[in-house]
Amino acid sequence: MNILHLDSSITGDNSASRALSAAIVRELTDADPAAAVTYRDLVADPLDHLTLPGFGTPQSAEVLAEFKAADVVVIGAPMYNFTIPSQLKAWIDRVLIAGETFRYTDTGSEGLAGGKKVIVALARGGLYGHGTAQRGIEHAERYLTDALAFIGITVPQFVIAEGLALGDEPRAAALEAAHRAVREIGAACPVA
């Protein structure tokens, strides 16, 4: 199994999404010790924001090749200002490429990356889940779901820790619930 592990939080060691994405990768590699992991820190080694000349760079080709080679993609994604970090958006701009991960047909677009499993570790300071008053302004989970579906990944898995900025107790409870979800991912993995 080839795992592509991405992190996009700017908060380093204080990042909940980084801790969760690392825990997910540990669960996957414990289940398959032969798994190969490619790690890309989109903050420490940021991609330029996309320009027309940027489509043809070796760096863009490398990012696309990493994605295409992965069986599983683990994304650490905090929600900033209701959406994903611009660093993660720059990566997505290198992956959603016509003729590579999707194509246009007479009946509309068709995703070409449907064989991949994607697990997103999503951290949110407030409460934006289904049934909350702020759901309508949540654009991280919803954007990632739509962008991945466009390339054929219709069932991404989300591990969500939310309410992290609501105080110590809500933060601890949210992180414990998220880590339980991570352990369930490990339990569901076939043992190599």
Image: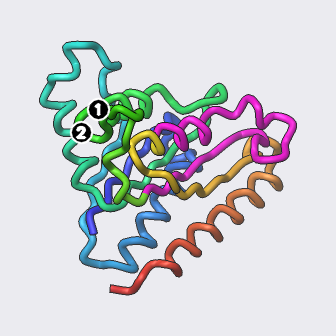
Q: Quadrant of the C terminus?
A: bottom left
Identity, as a three-letter code, of the amino acid under mark 2: Glu
| Callout 2–callout 1 Cβ contact below 8 Å | yes
Q: Which mark is residue 187?
A: none
Residue bounds of the magenta highlight? 118-147
Number of numbered tags placed on the structure image: 2
Check disc 2 and report its element: helix, strand or loop: loop
Quarter occupied by residue 90: top left
Where does the image place residue 182, in percent across and percent down from the top left?
57, 67
Q: Residue at x 43, y 29 (%)?
A: 89
Identity, as a three-letter code, of the amino acid under mark 1: Ile
Q: Residue at x 54, y 58 (%)?
A: 157
Q: Is residue 57 visible?
A: yes
Where does the image place residue 59, in percent across and percent down from the top left?
18, 31
Q: Which residue is mark 1?
A: 97
From the viewer's perspective, is 59 left or right of 186?
A: left
Which residue is the extreme one toward the left? 58
Above or below, 19 relative to 123 = below
